[in-house]
Image (cartoon, rainbow, N blue to C red):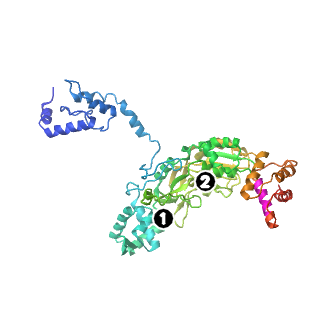
Amino acid sequence: MSNPATESSHGHDPKLEALIARINGLGNGAPPSPPTPPSPVSAPARPDPPPSRRAAAAAPPPAGRPAAPTGTAARPAAPRPESPPLAAAQIPAAPPVKNVALPLGFHPSRDEPWRPLEPRSLEEGNISETVIEQIIFRYLLNNGESDGRRVADQLKLPFRMVEPVLTRLKMEQRVAYRSATATGDYVYALTESGRAVARNHASDCTYYGACPVRLKEYIASVKLQTIEGQRPQKADLQRAFSDLLINPRMLNRLGPAINSGRGMFLFGFPGNGKTSIAERVTAAFGKYIWIPRAIDVDGDIMRVFDPMNHELAMPEADAGLLDQGGFDKRWVRVRRPTLVAGGELTMEMLEVQNNQDNGISEAPLQLKSNCGTLLIDDFGRQKMSVDQLLNRWIVPLEKRYDYLNMSSGKKIQVPFDQLVIFSTNLEPKDLVDDAFLRRIPYKIEVTNPSEADFRKLFEIMCKVLKIPYQAGPIDYLVQTHYLPVERPFRNCQPRDLLLQVRNYCLYNGLEVELKNEYFDFAVDNYFSVM
Protein backbone atom coordinates (compact mmCIF):
# COMPACT_ATOMS: atom_id res chain seq x y z
CA MET A 1 0.00 0.00 0.00
CA SER A 2 1.23 3.49 -0.78
CA ASN A 3 1.17 6.28 1.71
CA PRO A 4 -1.66 8.79 0.93
CA ALA A 5 0.28 11.58 2.53
CA THR A 6 3.23 10.93 0.27
CA GLU A 7 1.06 10.75 -2.81
CA SER A 8 -0.70 13.99 -1.98
CA SER A 9 2.52 15.82 -1.20
CA HIS A 10 4.08 14.78 -4.48
CA GLY A 11 1.05 14.71 -6.69
CA HIS A 12 -0.34 18.16 -5.90
CA ASP A 13 2.89 20.09 -6.41
CA PRO A 14 3.56 20.42 -10.15
CA LYS A 15 6.77 22.47 -9.61
CA LEU A 16 8.26 19.71 -7.47
CA GLU A 17 7.26 17.10 -10.05
CA ALA A 18 8.93 19.10 -12.81
CA LEU A 19 12.10 19.54 -10.75
CA ILE A 20 12.30 15.81 -9.98
CA ALA A 21 11.73 14.97 -13.64
CA ARG A 22 14.48 17.38 -14.71
CA ILE A 23 16.96 15.98 -12.19
CA ASN A 24 16.24 12.42 -13.34
CA GLY A 25 16.68 13.52 -16.93
CA LEU A 26 20.05 15.13 -16.19
CA GLY A 27 21.20 12.19 -14.12
CA ASN A 28 20.71 9.37 -16.58
CA GLY A 29 19.37 10.83 -19.78
CA ALA A 30 16.06 8.92 -19.38
CA PRO A 31 12.64 10.42 -20.12
CA PRO A 32 10.80 11.96 -17.18
CA SER A 33 9.37 9.24 -14.96
CA PRO A 34 6.28 9.18 -12.78
CA PRO A 35 6.89 10.50 -9.28
CA THR A 36 8.14 7.80 -6.92
CA PRO A 37 9.29 7.85 -3.31
CA PRO A 38 12.91 9.04 -3.05
CA SER A 39 15.51 6.28 -2.92
CA PRO A 40 19.32 6.07 -3.18
CA VAL A 41 19.15 4.91 -6.76
CA SER A 42 17.12 7.88 -7.96
CA ALA A 43 19.19 10.55 -6.20
CA PRO A 44 21.34 12.57 -8.59
CA ALA A 45 24.59 11.69 -6.78
CA ARG A 46 26.36 10.54 -9.93
CA PRO A 47 25.86 13.17 -12.62
CA ASP A 48 28.38 11.64 -15.04
CA PRO A 49 27.50 7.96 -15.67
CA PRO A 50 29.43 5.78 -18.12
CA PRO A 51 28.59 6.19 -21.84
CA SER A 52 27.03 2.73 -21.95
CA ARG A 53 24.51 3.76 -19.31
CA ARG A 54 23.66 6.96 -21.16
CA ALA A 55 23.07 5.02 -24.37
CA ALA A 56 20.85 2.50 -22.64
CA ALA A 57 18.86 5.21 -20.91
CA ALA A 58 18.41 7.15 -24.14
CA ALA A 59 16.83 4.14 -25.89
CA PRO A 60 13.00 4.15 -25.87
CA PRO A 61 11.48 1.78 -23.28
CA PRO A 62 9.41 -1.20 -24.38
CA ALA A 63 5.69 -0.60 -24.72
CA GLY A 64 3.72 -0.87 -21.52
CA ARG A 65 6.76 -0.74 -19.26
CA PRO A 66 7.60 2.29 -17.07
CA ALA A 67 10.85 3.94 -18.11
CA ALA A 68 12.25 5.02 -14.75
CA PRO A 69 12.21 1.73 -12.77
CA THR A 70 14.00 -0.11 -15.56
CA GLY A 71 16.66 2.62 -16.01
CA THR A 72 17.37 3.22 -12.34
CA ALA A 73 16.69 0.16 -10.24
CA ALA A 74 18.51 -2.43 -12.35
CA ARG A 75 21.86 -0.60 -12.80
CA PRO A 76 23.07 0.04 -9.22
CA ALA A 77 22.96 -3.67 -8.42
CA ALA A 78 26.20 -4.11 -10.42
CA PRO A 79 28.53 -1.15 -9.79
CA ARG A 80 31.53 -2.79 -11.45
CA PRO A 81 31.45 -0.71 -14.67
CA GLU A 82 32.10 2.43 -12.57
CA SER A 83 35.02 0.98 -10.59
CA PRO A 84 37.87 1.50 -13.10
CA PRO A 85 37.39 5.30 -13.35
CA LEU A 86 37.37 5.60 -9.56
CA ALA A 87 40.51 3.48 -9.20
CA ALA A 88 42.32 5.54 -11.82
CA ALA A 89 41.38 8.76 -10.04
CA GLN A 90 42.68 7.45 -6.72
CA ILE A 91 46.10 6.44 -8.09
CA PRO A 92 47.52 9.34 -10.12
CA ALA A 93 50.51 8.80 -12.37
CA ALA A 94 52.59 11.31 -10.42
CA PRO A 95 51.71 13.32 -7.32
CA PRO A 96 51.11 16.80 -8.75
CA VAL A 97 51.75 20.23 -7.25
CA LYS A 98 48.34 21.63 -6.33
CA ASN A 99 47.48 22.41 -9.95
CA VAL A 100 49.11 20.33 -12.68
CA ALA A 101 47.83 22.57 -15.46
CA LEU A 102 50.63 23.75 -17.73
CA PRO A 103 51.26 27.18 -19.26
CA LEU A 104 49.46 27.87 -22.51
CA GLY A 105 51.55 26.82 -25.48
CA PHE A 106 53.91 24.59 -23.47
CA HIS A 107 54.17 20.94 -24.46
CA PRO A 108 56.04 18.55 -22.14
CA SER A 109 58.98 16.75 -23.68
CA ARG A 110 61.92 14.65 -22.59
CA ASP A 111 64.12 17.74 -22.51
CA GLU A 112 61.61 19.65 -20.36
CA PRO A 113 58.98 17.41 -18.77
CA TRP A 114 57.27 20.10 -16.70
CA ARG A 115 56.89 23.85 -16.37
CA PRO A 116 55.27 25.65 -13.40
CA LEU A 117 52.08 27.53 -14.18
CA GLU A 118 51.79 31.09 -12.94
CA PRO A 119 49.18 31.21 -10.13
CA ARG A 120 46.09 33.36 -10.63
CA SER A 121 45.54 33.98 -6.92
CA LEU A 122 47.24 33.51 -3.57
CA GLU A 123 44.91 30.61 -2.77
CA GLU A 124 45.63 28.84 -6.05
CA GLY A 125 49.37 29.25 -5.59
CA ASN A 126 49.22 28.20 -1.93
CA ILE A 127 51.01 31.47 -1.10
CA SER A 128 50.99 32.92 2.38
CA GLU A 129 50.00 36.57 2.50
CA THR A 130 51.98 36.88 5.73
CA VAL A 131 55.18 35.83 3.93
CA ILE A 132 54.50 38.38 1.17
CA GLU A 133 53.95 41.09 3.75
CA GLN A 134 57.21 40.28 5.55
CA ILE A 135 59.22 40.38 2.32
CA ILE A 136 57.65 43.73 1.35
CA PHE A 137 58.59 45.21 4.72
CA ARG A 138 62.21 44.03 4.44
CA TYR A 139 62.47 45.15 0.81
CA LEU A 140 61.22 48.68 1.52
CA LEU A 141 63.42 48.86 4.63
CA ASN A 142 66.51 48.15 2.52
CA ASN A 143 65.53 50.18 -0.55
CA GLY A 144 63.78 53.15 1.02
CA GLU A 145 61.01 53.37 -1.56
CA SER A 146 59.73 51.50 -4.59
CA ASP A 147 56.77 51.50 -6.92
CA GLY A 148 54.31 48.63 -6.69
CA ARG A 149 55.40 46.89 -9.88
CA ARG A 150 59.00 46.73 -8.75
CA VAL A 151 57.83 45.22 -5.48
CA ALA A 152 55.90 42.59 -7.43
CA ASP A 153 58.94 41.94 -9.62
CA GLN A 154 61.07 41.48 -6.51
CA LEU A 155 58.57 38.93 -5.22
CA LYS A 156 58.36 37.31 -8.69
CA LEU A 157 54.57 37.47 -8.48
CA PRO A 158 51.99 39.13 -10.74
CA PHE A 159 51.21 42.71 -9.75
CA ARG A 160 47.51 41.90 -9.43
CA MET A 161 48.35 39.58 -6.50
CA VAL A 162 50.64 42.05 -4.73
CA GLU A 163 48.59 45.22 -5.16
CA PRO A 164 45.85 44.22 -2.63
CA VAL A 165 48.52 43.59 0.02
CA LEU A 166 50.06 47.03 -0.60
CA THR A 167 46.61 48.62 -0.46
CA ARG A 168 45.90 46.98 2.88
CA LEU A 169 49.25 48.11 4.28
CA LYS A 170 48.39 51.64 3.15
CA MET A 171 45.04 51.47 4.95
CA GLU A 172 46.84 50.21 8.07
CA GLN A 173 49.25 53.16 7.73
CA ARG A 174 52.28 50.87 7.49
CA VAL A 175 53.21 52.35 4.12
CA ALA A 176 52.49 55.70 2.50
CA TYR A 177 52.28 56.98 -1.05
CA ARG A 178 55.40 58.93 -1.94
CA SER A 179 54.22 59.79 -5.45
CA ALA A 180 52.28 58.43 -8.41
CA THR A 181 53.66 56.90 -11.60
CA ALA A 182 52.64 57.36 -15.23
CA THR A 183 51.24 53.82 -15.32
CA GLY A 184 48.68 54.46 -12.57
CA ASP A 185 50.89 52.91 -9.89
CA TYR A 186 52.26 54.47 -6.70
CA VAL A 187 55.67 54.80 -5.14
CA TYR A 188 55.54 53.29 -1.65
CA ALA A 189 57.61 54.08 1.42
CA LEU A 190 57.43 52.86 5.01
CA THR A 191 55.83 54.99 7.68
CA GLU A 192 57.34 55.20 11.16
CA SER A 193 55.14 52.38 12.43
CA GLY A 194 55.88 50.37 9.28
CA ARG A 195 59.60 50.89 9.80
CA ALA A 196 59.33 49.50 13.32
CA VAL A 197 57.51 46.42 12.03
CA ALA A 198 60.11 45.99 9.26
CA ARG A 199 62.99 46.10 11.75
CA ASN A 200 61.26 43.44 13.82
CA HIS A 201 60.93 41.17 10.77
CA ALA A 202 64.53 41.84 9.73
CA SER A 203 65.82 40.82 13.15
CA ASP A 204 64.50 37.31 12.53
CA CYS A 205 65.43 37.00 8.85
CA THR A 206 66.81 39.45 6.30
CA TYR A 207 65.50 37.62 3.22
CA TYR A 208 63.66 39.86 0.73
CA GLY A 209 64.03 37.90 -2.51
CA ALA A 210 61.46 35.97 -4.51
CA CYS A 211 58.44 34.65 -2.66
CA PRO A 212 59.42 31.13 -1.55
CA VAL A 213 57.67 27.99 -2.75
CA ARG A 214 56.05 25.58 -0.28
CA LEU A 215 58.02 22.42 0.48
CA LYS A 216 55.28 20.09 -0.75
CA GLU A 217 55.25 21.86 -4.12
CA TYR A 218 58.99 21.34 -4.47
CA ILE A 219 58.66 17.65 -3.60
CA ALA A 220 55.94 17.25 -6.22
CA SER A 221 58.07 19.03 -8.84
CA VAL A 222 60.94 16.60 -8.26
CA LYS A 223 58.60 13.67 -8.85
CA LEU A 224 57.45 15.23 -12.10
CA GLN A 225 61.06 15.72 -13.29
CA THR A 226 62.68 12.66 -11.69
CA ILE A 227 65.85 11.36 -13.25
CA GLU A 228 64.56 7.82 -12.89
CA GLY A 229 61.81 8.56 -15.40
CA GLN A 230 64.23 9.53 -18.20
CA ARG A 231 65.58 6.05 -19.06
CA PRO A 232 68.33 7.12 -21.52
CA GLN A 233 69.15 4.64 -24.28
CA LYS A 234 72.21 3.85 -26.36
CA ALA A 235 71.74 6.76 -28.77
CA ASP A 236 71.49 9.20 -25.83
CA LEU A 237 74.79 7.93 -24.38
CA GLN A 238 76.55 8.10 -27.73
CA ARG A 239 75.47 11.72 -28.05
CA ALA A 240 76.58 12.55 -24.49
CA PHE A 241 80.03 10.99 -24.97
CA SER A 242 80.53 12.17 -28.55
CA ASP A 243 83.54 14.32 -27.58
CA LEU A 244 85.29 11.45 -25.77
CA LEU A 245 87.07 8.44 -27.23
CA ILE A 246 85.40 5.72 -25.20
CA ASN A 247 85.61 1.99 -25.74
CA PRO A 248 82.29 0.47 -26.94
CA ARG A 249 82.56 -2.18 -24.22
CA MET A 250 82.84 0.53 -21.60
CA LEU A 251 79.82 2.31 -23.08
CA ASN A 252 77.80 -0.90 -22.91
CA ARG A 253 78.66 -1.25 -19.24
CA LEU A 254 77.84 2.37 -18.46
CA GLY A 255 74.52 2.27 -20.32
CA PRO A 256 72.43 0.11 -17.93
CA ALA A 257 73.89 1.93 -14.92
CA ILE A 258 72.93 5.35 -16.28
CA ASN A 259 69.57 4.05 -17.46
CA SER A 260 68.73 2.90 -13.92
CA GLY A 261 69.30 6.34 -12.37
CA ARG A 262 70.81 4.66 -9.31
CA GLY A 263 74.26 4.81 -7.73
CA MET A 264 77.49 3.90 -9.51
CA PHE A 265 81.14 3.28 -8.61
CA LEU A 266 83.79 4.27 -11.14
CA PHE A 267 87.18 2.98 -10.12
CA GLY A 268 90.52 2.40 -11.79
CA PHE A 269 93.96 3.88 -12.25
CA PRO A 270 94.28 7.68 -12.23
CA GLY A 271 94.29 9.48 -15.56
CA ASN A 272 91.87 7.22 -17.40
CA GLY A 273 88.97 9.66 -17.51
CA LYS A 274 86.72 8.67 -14.60
CA THR A 275 85.91 12.30 -13.85
CA SER A 276 85.40 13.10 -17.54
CA ILE A 277 82.97 10.21 -17.85
CA ALA A 278 81.03 11.21 -14.76
CA GLU A 279 80.75 14.84 -15.87
CA ARG A 280 79.15 13.80 -19.18
CA VAL A 281 76.60 11.41 -17.72
CA THR A 282 74.01 14.15 -17.15
CA ALA A 283 73.98 14.98 -20.87
CA ALA A 284 72.34 11.59 -21.50
CA PHE A 285 69.23 12.77 -19.65
CA GLY A 286 66.83 15.56 -20.57
CA LYS A 287 68.20 19.08 -20.83
CA TYR A 288 66.21 21.21 -18.40
CA ILE A 289 64.49 21.15 -15.03
CA TRP A 290 62.72 23.83 -12.98
CA ILE A 291 63.80 24.53 -9.42
CA PRO A 292 62.48 27.12 -6.94
CA ARG A 293 64.60 30.08 -6.01
CA ALA A 294 63.78 29.41 -2.35
CA ILE A 295 61.62 27.07 -0.27
CA ASP A 296 59.41 27.98 2.67
CA VAL A 297 59.51 25.34 5.42
CA ASP A 298 56.97 26.54 7.97
CA GLY A 299 58.54 29.98 8.15
CA ASP A 300 62.16 28.92 7.55
CA ILE A 301 63.58 30.16 4.23
CA MET A 302 65.92 27.75 2.44
CA ARG A 303 67.61 28.85 -0.78
CA VAL A 304 67.84 26.22 -3.51
CA PHE A 305 68.97 28.04 -6.65
CA ASP A 306 72.76 28.42 -6.55
CA PRO A 307 74.41 30.31 -9.45
CA MET A 308 77.69 28.57 -8.62
CA ASN A 309 76.21 25.10 -9.23
CA HIS A 310 73.18 25.73 -11.45
CA GLU A 311 73.42 26.92 -15.05
CA LEU A 312 70.52 29.23 -15.74
CA ALA A 313 68.63 28.48 -18.98
CA MET A 314 65.42 30.52 -18.93
CA PRO A 315 62.99 30.28 -21.86
CA GLU A 316 63.44 32.70 -24.73
CA ALA A 317 62.30 36.20 -23.80
CA ASP A 318 60.86 36.89 -27.25
CA ALA A 319 58.14 34.24 -26.83
CA GLY A 320 54.98 36.33 -26.51
CA LEU A 321 53.13 34.10 -24.08
CA LEU A 322 56.12 33.89 -21.79
CA ASP A 323 56.44 37.65 -21.70
CA GLN A 324 52.84 37.79 -20.52
CA GLY A 325 53.65 35.56 -17.56
CA GLY A 326 52.96 32.03 -18.71
CA PHE A 327 55.17 30.43 -16.06
CA ASP A 328 55.67 30.98 -12.36
CA LYS A 329 58.57 33.43 -11.95
CA ARG A 330 59.35 32.05 -8.49
CA TRP A 331 60.96 29.12 -10.32
CA VAL A 332 63.98 29.15 -12.63
CA ARG A 333 64.82 26.81 -15.47
CA VAL A 334 68.32 25.35 -15.26
CA ARG A 335 70.21 22.66 -17.08
CA ARG A 336 70.05 19.33 -15.32
CA PRO A 337 72.67 19.87 -12.65
CA THR A 338 76.03 18.13 -12.35
CA LEU A 339 77.57 18.84 -8.97
CA VAL A 340 81.12 17.74 -8.21
CA ALA A 341 82.55 17.41 -4.70
CA GLY A 342 86.13 16.29 -4.24
CA GLY A 343 88.50 16.27 -1.32
CA GLU A 344 86.88 19.44 0.06
CA LEU A 345 83.64 17.60 0.94
CA THR A 346 82.69 17.89 4.61
CA MET A 347 79.75 16.71 6.68
CA GLU A 348 78.48 20.30 6.96
CA MET A 349 77.99 20.44 3.18
CA LEU A 350 75.48 17.57 3.44
CA GLU A 351 73.28 19.36 5.97
CA VAL A 352 71.17 22.51 5.86
CA GLN A 353 73.54 25.42 6.48
CA ASN A 354 71.90 28.17 8.49
CA ASN A 355 73.45 31.62 8.59
CA GLN A 356 72.91 32.98 12.08
CA ASP A 357 73.54 36.54 10.94
CA ASN A 358 70.79 36.78 8.31
CA GLY A 359 68.52 33.86 9.29
CA ILE A 360 68.62 32.35 5.78
CA SER A 361 69.32 28.65 5.25
CA GLU A 362 71.22 27.15 2.33
CA ALA A 363 70.18 23.83 0.81
CA PRO A 364 72.70 20.98 1.12
CA LEU A 365 74.69 19.65 -1.81
CA GLN A 366 72.51 16.60 -2.46
CA LEU A 367 69.29 18.64 -2.58
CA LYS A 368 70.80 21.05 -5.11
CA SER A 369 71.70 18.06 -7.30
CA ASN A 370 68.17 16.60 -7.37
CA CYS A 371 67.09 15.49 -10.86
CA GLY A 372 70.73 15.53 -11.93
CA THR A 373 74.09 13.95 -11.13
CA LEU A 374 76.18 14.19 -7.97
CA LEU A 375 79.82 13.20 -8.42
CA ILE A 376 81.91 12.38 -5.35
CA ASP A 377 85.36 12.63 -6.89
CA ASP A 378 88.51 11.15 -5.32
CA PHE A 379 86.29 9.14 -2.99
CA GLY A 380 88.24 8.12 0.09
CA ARG A 381 90.31 11.31 0.20
CA GLN A 382 87.72 13.63 1.74
CA LYS A 383 88.29 15.57 4.95
CA MET A 384 85.48 13.52 6.46
CA SER A 385 86.01 9.82 7.01
CA VAL A 386 84.51 7.28 4.64
CA ASP A 387 82.46 5.80 7.49
CA GLN A 388 80.86 9.17 8.20
CA LEU A 389 79.76 9.59 4.60
CA LEU A 390 78.50 6.03 4.38
CA ASN A 391 76.50 6.29 7.59
CA ARG A 392 75.00 9.58 6.38
CA TRP A 393 73.87 8.23 3.01
CA ILE A 394 73.28 4.53 3.50
CA VAL A 395 69.51 5.01 3.93
CA PRO A 396 68.97 7.77 1.31
CA LEU A 397 70.73 5.71 -1.35
CA GLU A 398 68.26 2.89 -0.86
CA LYS A 399 65.04 4.71 0.05
CA ARG A 400 65.55 7.67 -2.33
CA TYR A 401 64.63 10.22 0.32
CA ASP A 402 66.61 12.10 2.94
CA TYR A 403 65.93 13.81 6.25
CA LEU A 404 67.17 17.32 6.96
CA ASN A 405 67.16 19.36 10.16
CA MET A 406 66.08 22.98 9.89
CA SER A 407 67.38 25.74 12.13
CA SER A 408 64.07 25.80 13.99
CA GLY A 409 64.59 22.18 15.02
CA LYS A 410 62.03 20.84 12.56
CA LYS A 411 63.02 17.69 10.67
CA ILE A 412 61.78 17.42 7.08
CA GLN A 413 61.76 14.67 4.48
CA VAL A 414 63.04 15.64 1.04
CA PRO A 415 63.67 13.71 -2.20
CA PHE A 416 67.07 12.12 -2.79
CA ASP A 417 66.65 11.93 -6.54
CA GLN A 418 69.97 12.03 -8.37
CA LEU A 419 72.48 9.67 -9.94
CA VAL A 420 75.26 9.45 -7.34
CA ILE A 421 78.64 8.55 -8.83
CA PHE A 422 81.59 7.66 -6.62
CA SER A 423 84.88 8.03 -8.48
CA THR A 424 87.98 6.62 -6.87
CA ASN A 425 91.48 5.38 -7.67
CA LEU A 426 91.17 2.82 -4.89
CA GLU A 427 89.42 -0.53 -4.82
CA PRO A 428 85.83 -0.06 -3.60
CA LYS A 429 86.00 -3.18 -1.40
CA ASP A 430 88.95 -1.64 0.41
CA LEU A 431 86.95 1.50 1.17
CA VAL A 432 83.47 0.34 2.14
CA ASP A 433 81.72 -2.71 3.53
CA ASP A 434 79.33 -5.05 1.75
CA ALA A 435 76.23 -3.33 3.16
CA PHE A 436 77.13 -0.11 1.38
CA LEU A 437 78.29 -1.81 -1.81
CA ARG A 438 74.89 -3.49 -2.03
CA ARG A 439 73.25 -0.05 -2.24
CA ILE A 440 75.54 0.94 -5.14
CA PRO A 441 74.33 -1.59 -7.73
CA TYR A 442 76.90 -0.81 -10.44
CA LYS A 443 80.68 -1.04 -9.98
CA ILE A 444 82.51 -0.23 -13.20
CA GLU A 445 86.26 -0.34 -13.67
CA VAL A 446 87.71 2.23 -16.05
CA THR A 447 90.59 0.29 -17.58
CA ASN A 448 93.72 1.41 -19.40
CA PRO A 449 93.32 2.09 -23.13
CA SER A 450 94.68 -0.31 -25.72
CA GLU A 451 97.62 0.68 -27.87
CA ALA A 452 95.31 1.37 -30.81
CA ASP A 453 93.11 3.65 -28.67
CA PHE A 454 96.22 5.32 -27.27
CA ARG A 455 97.43 6.17 -30.79
CA LYS A 456 93.95 7.36 -31.75
CA LEU A 457 93.94 9.74 -28.80
CA PHE A 458 97.11 11.40 -30.14
CA GLU A 459 95.40 11.92 -33.49
CA ILE A 460 92.34 13.47 -31.82
CA MET A 461 94.32 15.72 -29.48
CA CYS A 462 96.55 16.96 -32.30
CA LYS A 463 93.42 18.33 -33.97
CA VAL A 464 92.27 19.92 -30.73
CA LEU A 465 95.66 21.55 -30.04
CA LYS A 466 96.20 22.41 -33.72
CA ILE A 467 99.44 20.45 -34.00
CA PRO A 468 100.13 18.72 -37.36
CA TYR A 469 99.77 14.99 -36.79
CA GLN A 470 102.60 12.66 -37.81
CA ALA A 471 102.53 8.92 -37.17
CA GLY A 472 106.34 8.53 -37.12
CA PRO A 473 107.04 10.39 -33.84
CA ILE A 474 104.11 8.58 -32.19
CA ASP A 475 105.63 5.23 -33.23
CA TYR A 476 108.96 6.36 -31.78
CA LEU A 477 107.29 7.36 -28.51
CA VAL A 478 105.52 4.02 -28.08
CA GLN A 479 108.47 1.86 -29.17
CA THR A 480 111.04 3.79 -27.11
CA HIS A 481 109.33 5.06 -23.97
CA TYR A 482 106.42 2.64 -23.39
CA LEU A 483 106.84 -0.94 -24.60
CA PRO A 484 110.50 -1.54 -23.51
CA VAL A 485 109.84 -0.34 -19.93
CA GLU A 486 106.30 -1.78 -19.78
CA ARG A 487 104.86 1.61 -19.03
CA PRO A 488 101.04 1.43 -18.92
CA PHE A 489 99.01 3.58 -21.28
CA ARG A 490 96.72 6.19 -19.72
CA ASN A 491 93.97 8.20 -21.41
CA CYS A 492 95.31 11.51 -20.12
CA GLN A 493 98.89 11.06 -21.38
CA PRO A 494 98.45 12.02 -25.06
CA ARG A 495 97.00 15.39 -24.07
CA ASP A 496 99.62 16.00 -21.39
CA LEU A 497 102.60 15.05 -23.56
CA LEU A 498 101.38 17.10 -26.51
CA LEU A 499 101.00 20.14 -24.24
CA GLN A 500 104.62 19.68 -23.15
CA VAL A 501 105.74 19.50 -26.78
CA ARG A 502 103.79 22.63 -27.71
CA ASN A 503 105.06 24.64 -24.74
CA TYR A 504 108.65 23.58 -25.49
CA CYS A 505 108.34 24.79 -29.07
CA LEU A 506 106.70 28.08 -28.14
CA TYR A 507 109.35 28.83 -25.50
CA ASN A 508 112.22 28.18 -27.90
CA GLY A 509 110.60 30.00 -30.83
CA LEU A 510 110.30 26.81 -32.86
CA GLU A 511 107.58 25.65 -35.18
CA VAL A 512 105.05 23.60 -33.26
CA GLU A 513 105.37 20.09 -34.67
CA LEU A 514 106.00 16.50 -33.58
CA LYS A 515 109.63 15.35 -33.45
CA ASN A 516 111.38 12.50 -31.67
CA GLU A 517 113.61 14.79 -29.63
CA TYR A 518 110.61 16.85 -28.52
CA PHE A 519 108.98 13.71 -27.14
CA ASP A 520 112.23 12.79 -25.38
CA PHE A 521 112.12 16.12 -23.58
CA ALA A 522 108.42 15.75 -22.71
CA VAL A 523 108.85 12.21 -21.37
CA ASP A 524 111.80 13.22 -19.17
CA ASN A 525 109.72 15.97 -17.59
CA TYR A 526 106.43 14.09 -17.33
CA PHE A 527 107.66 10.74 -15.98
CA SER A 528 110.57 11.97 -13.87
CA VAL A 529 108.90 10.88 -10.60
CA MET A 530 106.35 8.42 -12.00
Relative to 170, 438 lies left or right: right
- Give the residues in magenta: 493-503
Q: Main secondary structure of the magenta part?
A: helix
**Relative to residue 63, is residue 483 depicted above or below?**
below
Kind of residue indicated by mark 1: Gly
| 186 or 61, nearer to the observer | 61
- Camera-side residue: 508 or 444? 508
Q: Residue 12 in the image: state x and y as whole percent.
A: 11, 36
Crowdedness near tag 2: few (<14), some (14–19) or many (≥20) residues, C-alpha within 10 Å:
many
Q: What residue would you read off at disc 1?
A: 209
Q: Which corner quadrant holds the N terminus?
A: top left
In front of the other: 2 or 181: 181
Q: Residues within 10 Å of mark 1 (few under 14, many from 20)?
A: some
Residue 428 is marked as none
Q: Is residue 29 above or below residue 236?
A: above
In the image, 114 versus 78, the foreground residue is 114
Q: Secondary structure at mark 1?
A: loop
Single out the mark in the foreground, 1 or 2: 2
Q: Is residue 200 left or right of residue 37?
A: right
Three-letter amino acid code at the position of disc 2: Thr
Magenta stretch encompasses residue 502: yes
Q: Is residue 469 on the magenta stretch?
A: no
Q: According to the image, label 2 marks what residue?
A: 338
The picture places residue 11, in percent across and down from the top left corner, at 13, 34
Element carrying mark 2: strand
Asked if residue 270 shows in the view, the reply is: no
Query: For the point 87% across and 51% down, which residue is it?
Result: 480
Percent x, y of residue 386: 68, 50
Q: Tell me: 102 left or right of 386.
A: left
- Position in image of residue 273 (x %, y %): 71, 51
Whether residue 357 is visible, yes or no, is: yes
Mark 1 or mark 2: which comes first in sequence? 1
